[in-house]
Structures are given as structure tokens and as C-alpha cells.
Image (spheres, grey):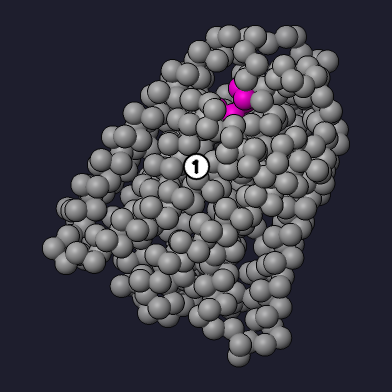
Amino acid sequence: MWTAWTRSLIGARPGEGRATVLSGLHFFLILFSYFLVRPVREAMGVQRGLDELTWLFTLTLFVMVGANAVYALCASRMRRSLLQASVHRFFALTLLAFAGLLLIVPDVIGVRVGYAFYVWVSVFNLFIVSTFWAFMADGFRHDQAKRLFPPIAIGGTLGAIAGSSFTRTFAEELGPLWLMVGSAVLLECSLRVARMLDRRDFVEVEDLDPSTPERVPAEQPIRGGALRGLMLVSRSPYLMLICGYIGLLAIGSTLLYFTQARIVTDAADETNARIALFANIDLWTQIATLALQAFVTGRLLRGVGVGPMLVTLPVILLVGFAALAMAPATAAYSVLVLFNAAFRSGKYAIARPARETLFTVVTREEKYKAKTLLDTAVYRGGDFLGAQVFGLLAGATAVTLGGVALLAAVVAGVWGGCGVAIAILLGRRVARPSDPARGSHATPGAELQPPATATG
């Protein structure tokens, strides 16, 4: 079924084509689902202006910490496929519940329910994407990840483009209700694809942690309690650096996010009009992401390596805020679209694939416990800090966008330093094949492939 032409197109070797295509389709449906409702979330979050966003970020952090604890307990007791199904269906059911409220009692739906939707979609987004990449890191070796994660990420970008295009085109005709229903249906479809992939491709994995067998069933629950992920991060300099990198990424993203929200609220007054503006930003971002993933990401991973890719996004943050600070007010939205497209496309097409390869050299327990903690609670913690700082700056009448740009420059400097340090530690881990922390090395179609040695 998987021809030599298909394998050549996606950079797969014999035995890897099916797993790569299904993984890309799985990610396509996940991001299609999310980007149907992302603009709805953005519009609901600014119903009463930017002042409400700060406490919404605070609430999101608390909900995320609680959700992470529940997820960690579930991971300790559920086999992998059941854990994944539970995450997908839980969020699908909550989306249908919000849609049901809009359908049955539309008069009751107001600002408070809109804020609840904002918080819940913020939790849904990070969890659904984090569990996807944990699944990928559990299924591919480090050398495979450098080749196959870029085409898999393209599948997600195509889904994001499809979702953004659909919402931009039909937002005013359909309204939030049917966008929520469509998102829930797509989540169920993505789960069906994941089951096909899990059943036939990722049967068993290696876990070189001395306390576990060298070969373990992929479906085996991950040990440890609700706080196990925090313990794993605190004991590992490598994971601590990743923690700092993700936290600074979130702070930088939040500074841009609040700037975007301010410009959009100034440009439109009605909710549906704002949904369309946010969807337009998402669409151009995903088009730029697709171009980078198709022509740049794979070459960067194989050529320059992970380190320079981790530093790229801090540089974009620095340059973008400088450009926005110098732009006249009449050109603010246009500059914002370009800056947002550059930053978020770099985030998805360059930093994200590079970041996910970092988890191919850790144990299975760290993939499912520590990684999820970093991708969700730590990320939302960075959001919280960024929101608080932006709120303080906005409250100071003497501070302009130039002051935000200056803060972004400081964040970018420290953030880039973390990226360099992570790349150094990654190189040391890859160079030591006997290192217990190298983790899972599942190989789809391994019987068709000669042994491969990971390279930095």
C-alpha cells in the first residue's frame, strides 16, 4: 500500500510509511478540531475587554494543574489506548455540552459561560496536543523523529488551515454552536485513526530505565502517582532546562497574545466580526507554517540540528516586537498579522518539532508524566506570569508598546540561552547509547529495518 514514491515524499524508510501517514492524519484531525473553535474562544475571551483576560489566565492555570493531576493518576492505571480514548472523548463530550447549552437554553448563555468555554478550550488545546506528541515520542526513535516529525507536523498544519478556513468562511452563518459540534465529531474521528495506528504499528517499546524491563508492552500503564511528573522534572537538569524553555516560550507567546487581543478589539466591536479577524490571523499563520514545514523544517533538523532551531523563535520574538513598536497605528493590524504569522509558524514548524525530539531520549515515565506536566501546567504557568506582567505594564500609563518590546528582548535573551544549554545536554545523551534516559525506541516495521544509530 505504501509505495516507494510515498515513502520518498515523506522521507520514510521501508516499514515506516504507514505509521507516518496515519500519524499525520491523526494530527490533521486533532488540529482541525481545535482550530474550528479557537477563534470562538478568542472572541468569547474579550467580550468585556482585555481586563478580563488576566484573571481568565489565572483561572486557566488552576484548572490546568488540577487536570494534570487527574491525568497523571489515570496514566498510572489505564493502558495507553484507553488513556488516549478517555482524553479525546472527555473533551468531545464537554464541547457537546457547551453546544447543548447554546441550543437548549440560549438565553442563559452569557459572558460567564463564554469565559468558562475560554478556560476549557485552553485546557483542551494543550492536553490534546501534548498527549499526541507523547504518543509520537513513545513510538519513534530519536533518529526517526528527526526525519518523520516534520511530515507528521505538516498533517497537523493542514488540519489547522482547514479549521481556520472553515471558521473564517462560515463563522457568521453557523455561529459557535455548530462549530463546537463539528469539533467534537472530528475528535472522535481522530481517535479512530489513533486506534488503527496503535493496534498495528506501536506494539512494544524499549524503556532502558534500569527499574523496568528492557522491552515492555506499549499498552502497559505508566507507574507513579499524581506528583510523579513534578518529581521527575526536579531530579533532572535536562528536564529542568526544558521546563525553563517552555515557561519562557509561554511568556513570550502571552505578550504577543495580549498585544494581538488589544489590536483586534480596537478593530472590531461585534463578536462574530472578531471571530472572523482572529480566524484570518490563524489562517495566514498556518499557511506560513505549512511553507516552513514543507521546505525548511526537515532540512534544518537534519542539517543544522536541534540547537539552532530552539534559538530561532526567541530571535523572531525580539525582531517582531521591535517592528510592532516602530509601526504607525494605522499599520498595526497588518504588522501584527505578519509578526504573528512569523512567530507562530516558527513555533509550530521549527521550535515544536525540535522540542518534541527532546523527549525521544527520556524514559516512558518521563514522556507521559513529566512531558505532560511541562506541556500543560508549566506552559499555563508561563501564560499566567506573562499575563500578570502585561497587566502591570498596561496599568502604567507611561509604558507604551516600546516598553513591552524591551521586556520581550530580555525574555528572548534568557530563552535563547536555555535553548543552547538544552542542545548541549541532548548531544551528550544521544552520544551515550547506554544512557538509561534515552527511553523508548519503538520501530514501526522494525523487522524491515537494519539497526540504526541515533545522531545528534
Residue 66 in the image: state x and y as whole percent: 61, 55
Residue 177 in the image: state x and y as whole percent: 64, 76
| Mark 1 neighbour density, 10 Å: few (under 14) some (14–19) many (20 or more) | many
| Amino acid type shown at disc 1 | Tyr
Pick the front one: 149 or 97: 97
- Residue 110, image quadrant: bottom right
Residue bounds of the magenta highlight: 358-362
Pick the front one: 9 or 235: 235
340 vs 103, left or right, is: left
Residue 197: tell me if it is visible: no
Q: Is residue 344 above or below residue 422?
A: below
The residue that label 1 is drawn on is 348
Return the residue found at the far left. Answer: 398
Identify the residue at horizontal 55%, vertical 15% (top origin). Answer: 429
Identify the residue at horizontal 55%, vertical 43% (top origin). Answer: 375
Magenta-span inclusion, residue 361: yes
Q: Regarding mark 1 in the picture, which secondary structure is present there?
A: helix
- Residue 357, image quadrant: top right
Q: Is residue 60 above or below residue 13?
A: below
Identify the residue at horizontal 56%, vertical 48% (top origin). Answer: 376
